[in-house]
């Protein structure tokens, strides 16, 4: 029984720059819209979003229907917290707040099967086609077509990024400029020299160790990010897209109203409403 390959890994192998969209909303129809628009992956979240497992499984299923990857940012936790998304058929996980190479090696041990790691074997979930996949195929697919991504987002982790990037068994690093800027006392200043230098250092560490670097958004000129080694490009977030669209449409309507002839213009609204 054929197992679905990673679209992101295929795009990377073809020399392309795969894209993802961060998802905060729980409705799987948002995933379907993303798939119909032809993004390569959706970034789902358990760290900052109140996703229950049924909602998450439906989001992962919607991604599978439209042949796009699902990358679940897990909560920092135990072995089970990290493999459960895989067993729900997520294409990959993003592990936040990885601080050093020892943590990186432990996560690889938890999430990869032998000979790479020591993940416990089940196969009775959708990722193994409910035991319909031969076990050898299941293990091979899990070790080669499932992504493990570490998130670097603190000055302390940055000091170890070269050692982290050198750990075998994972695929890429996501740089978190928001948390990094906050932790150095320059919250939201994503173009501050220290943040830019950190971003570049992460990209260089990935290039030197055969890992991909992933962006949290297009927070710098795209050509700069690509030159620095960023290969997986997160284009934004569903909630940002929705709020931007609503604001833009409201502005269009309000601007039109302001230019109407006096005979058609509505009465001014009370500021106390």
Image (cartoon, rainbow, N blue to C red):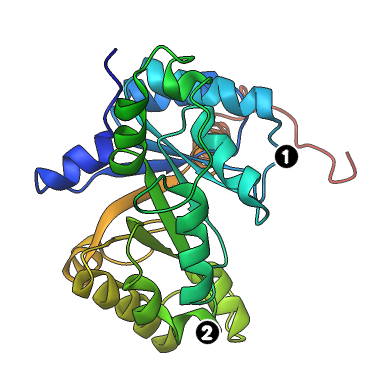
Placement of 165 over or under 73, stated as above or below: below
The one nearer the camera, 9 or 214, is 9
Placement of 65 over or under 206, stated as above or below: above
Report if residue 32 is visible in the image: no
Tell me the residue at 51%/58% (across/down): 107
Q: Quadrant of residue 205?
A: bottom left
Query: Image check: 69 left or right of 225?
Result: right
Residue tagged 2? 155
Do labels 1 and 2 touch, CB within 8 Å?
A: no
Residue tagged 1? 50
Tell me the residue at 35%/69% (across/down): 167
Q: Quadrant of residue 223?
A: bottom left
The one nearer the camera, 109 or 101, is 109
The one nearer the camera, 197 or 124, is 124
Q: Of label 1 and label 2, which has the lower sequence position?
A: 1
Q: Pick out the residue farthest to the right.
A: 272
SS at mark 2 in the image: helix
Q: Give the number of callouts.
A: 2
Placement of 33 over or under 199, stated as above or below: above
Expressed as whole percent of the image width and height from the top left, the position of residue 13 reads: 13, 45
The one nearer the camera, 123 or 249, is 123
Query: Image check: 152 left or right of 228?
Result: right
Q: Quadrant of the C terminus?
A: top right
């Amino acid at each position: 029984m054929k197992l679905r390959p990673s679209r992101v890994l295929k795009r990377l192998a073809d020399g392309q720059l795969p894209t993802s969209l961060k998802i905060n909303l729980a409705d799987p129809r948002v995933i379907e819209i993303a798939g119909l628009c032809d993004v390569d992956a959706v970034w789902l979240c358990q760290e900052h979003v109140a996703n229950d497992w049924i909602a998450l499984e439906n989001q992962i299923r919607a991604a599978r229907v439209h042949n796009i990857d699902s990358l679940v940012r897990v909560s920092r936790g135990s072995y089970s917290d990290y493999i459960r998304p895989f067993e729900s058929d997520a294409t990959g996980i993003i592990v936040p707040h990885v601080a050093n190479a020892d943590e990186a090696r432990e996560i690889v041990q938890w999430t990869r099967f032998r000979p790479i790691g020591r993940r416990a074997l089940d196969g009775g979930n959708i990722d193994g086609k409910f035991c319909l996949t031969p076990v050898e195929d299941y293990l091979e697919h899990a070790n080669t077509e499932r992504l493990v991504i570490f998130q670097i987002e603190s000055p302390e982790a940055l000091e170890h990024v070269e050692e982290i990037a050198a750990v075998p068994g994972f695929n890429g690093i996501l740089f978190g400029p928001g948390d990094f800027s906050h932790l150095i006392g320059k919250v939201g200043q994503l173009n501050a020299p220290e943040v830019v230098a950190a971003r570049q250092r992460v990209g260089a560490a990935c290039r030197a160790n055969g890992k991909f670097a992933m962006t949290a958004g297009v927070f710098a000129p795209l050509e700069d990010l690509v030159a620095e080694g960023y290969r997986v490009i997160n284009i934004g977030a569903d909630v940002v897209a929705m709020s931007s669209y609503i604001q833009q449409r409201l502005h269009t309507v309000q601007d039109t109203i302001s230019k109407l002839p006096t005979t058609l213009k509505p009465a001014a609204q009370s500021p106390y409403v």
